[in-house]
Image (cartoon, coloured by chain):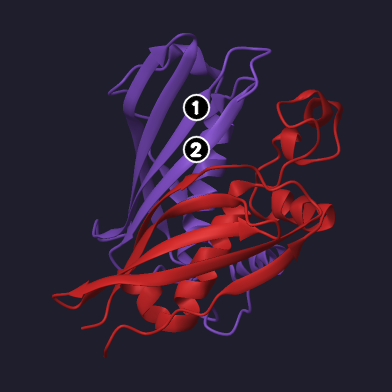
Chain colours: A purple, B red
Amino acid sequence: MKTDLEFSDLRKGDTFAEFPLSVTADEVLAYLDATGESPAIWTKHVPPLFLDALVVAELLAQVKIPKGVMHTGQEHESHRAARIDEVLTVRMGVAALSEKRGVTLAAFEADVRDAAGEPVTTMRISVMVAPDGVTV
Amino acid sequence: MTAPQVPSVTRRIEQERVDRYAVAGRDPNPIHRETPEAYAGPFGRPAAHGMILLAMVSEAMGAAFGLAWAETGSFKVRWRSPALPPVTVTASATLKKEQDGLATYEVAVQDEHGETLLTGTAAARTA
């Protein structure tokens, strides 16, 4: 899903529309090929960080990311391993948003659940946006 | 199970790997690729995705804990400096404490010059 949501429109407490997330075996292999990790233990399950990467990708798709954005931090908690081809649902929202001397700090929290509504993974994505022309 | 030693992971990151990650990880941000935006950006050249470095931490924890890493693992990290390809980086984890069946490690990624690119903690259950 793509939207035209501007980063400057975001407010703390905003939530995004839920979106489905499912990962195929080929997608896992392509991810592992890119990162360099062996696929040995990931024949039936999704590497936990790949879930984070795909949620970050959805964030990039939903919000117009301004010039000068930097991914500054990541938190993750696995509640169980996600299975390949399993249909998951992601809820994401703006957990924190502040601005100081033109630099915006934002954090997004995402909750990944299975078809039964049970938690699979929770994560927090922290970003910093510097004004144009500022080197950080 | 007692807290296992986590093996270090060392890898050469070339631009070609970054380009492949941009596709596989669905992160097309031009600051990571050979684009005018990257050369006009804060680092003066393309920077690898921070998630590639974090993936090496996850790889190290997975090597030590196996599937239990995906079932019970957690981490909290911050990126400190960019990885500018070509660069050789090493992800490492040092046991910090083991309590109530939870092993917690200090994790870091450094480049070949000893510069710290990422720091944080990672944990997984041993029981």
Q: Is residue A84 left or right of residue B52?
A: left
User: Residue A64's spot in the image, x, y percent?
Assistant: 58, 22
User: Residue B25's spot in the image, x, y percent?
Assistant: 63, 52
Q: Which mark is residue A72?
A: 2
| Amino acid bearing label 1 | Met
Q: Quadrant of the C terminus of chain A?
A: top right
User: Along the line of sight, which residue is nearer the eye, B110 or B39?
Assistant: B110
In this view, B35 is above or below B125: above
Q: Is residue A9 left or right of residue A71?
A: left
Label 2 secondary element: strand
Residue at figure coordinates x 49%, y 38% from the top left? A72
Of the numbered discs 1 and 2, the one sitting upstream in the chain is 2
Q: Which mark is residue A42?
A: none
Q: Mark 1 packing: few (<14 Cα in 10 Å), some, or many (20+)?
A: many
| Amino acid bearing label 2 | Thr
In this view, B73 is above or below B50: below
Q: Quadrant of the N terminus of chain A?
A: top right
* CB under 8 Å between discs 1 and 2: yes
* Residue at mark 2: chain: A
Residue at figure coordinates x 56%, y 65% from the top left? B91
Q: Which mark is residue A128?
A: 1
Residue at figure coordinates x 52%, y 80% from the top left? B7
